Amino acid sequence: MMLSCGKVVLPYCIERYEKGGKSKIERICEMVSMLPVSKGAVYGLSDSWYINKKVIEAHFERGYHLIGALKTNRIIYPQGIRIQIKDFAQYIEKNEVCLVTVNGSIYWVYRYEGALNDIDNAIVVLCWSEESF
C-alpha cells in the first residue's frame, strides 16, 4: 500500500501474500483499518480486483472515498432494472454523455449514480474515446 501527497509517494504497508492464509480482501481491509482517520477529502485508488462491498466499507469507515475500475459484467440497477454495465452501455445515447479532456486526450463520459450489487449507492463513470460516438 502506498500513500501520496502532492508529488510525494511513500510505501505505507508491505505484506507478503501467503496461500492458505487470509484472503487478499481480508488483508486489504486490515491495511485500510490501520490508515489514519481522514480529516478532509481522501481517496483510495484500486484496480477492479478490490472493488467490492467489504473494501469499499473499510475505506468509508476511515473517511476515505474509493476510486477503482469495474469489470463490464458488474450489475447496476438504473431505474431499478438489473443489468450488466456492458449491456446498459448499449442504451446510452450521445445526448446523455459529456466530453471531457484529460491530459490532452478527449473522452465521452456518462455518470451513473445508484445501486450496484451489495452497494446501495455508488457513482460509476463510464468512459469512451472521442471517436466512439
Image (tube, rainbow, N blue to C red):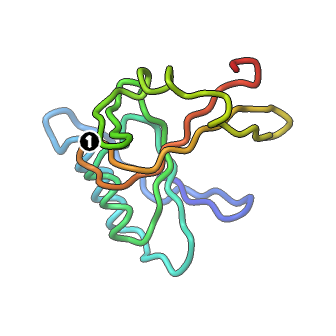
- In-image side of 7 versus 89 (left or right): right
Residue at 46% from the left image edge and 54% from the top image edge: 66
Q: Position of residue 102 (x, y in %)?
A: 78, 40
- Residue under circle 1? 117
Q: Relative to 69, is 11 above or below?
A: below
Extreme-right residue of the structure: 104
Residue at 81% from the left image edge and 32% from the top image edge: 105
Nearer to me, 75 or 46: 75
Q: Which corner quadrant of the image does residue 127 belong to?
A: top right
Extreme-left residue of the structure: 20
Q: Position of residue 9 (x, y in %)?
A: 64, 56
Q: Position of residue 65 (x, y in %)?
A: 47, 61
Nearer to me, 19 or 55: 55
Extreme-bottom residue of the structure: 39
| Amino acid type, residue under disc 1 in the picture | Asn
Q: Relative to 103, is 37 above or below?
A: below
Q: Which corner quadrant of the image does residue 76 belong to?
A: top left
User: How many tags in the picture?
Assistant: 1
- In the structure shown, which secondary structural element does the residue marked by tag 1 occupy? loop
Q: Relative to 9, is 52 above or below?
A: above
Residue at 46% from the left image edge and 37% from the top image edge: 47
Nearer to me, 12 or 41: 41
Pointer 1 local density, CA inside 10 Å: few below 14, some 14–19, many at least 20 = few
Q: Relative to 31, is 22 above or below?
A: above
Q: Position of residue 107 (x, y in %)?
A: 73, 32
Quarter of the figure with the C terminus: top right
Residue at 75% from the left image edge and 18% from the top image edge: 131
- In-image side of 33 versus 124 (left or right): left
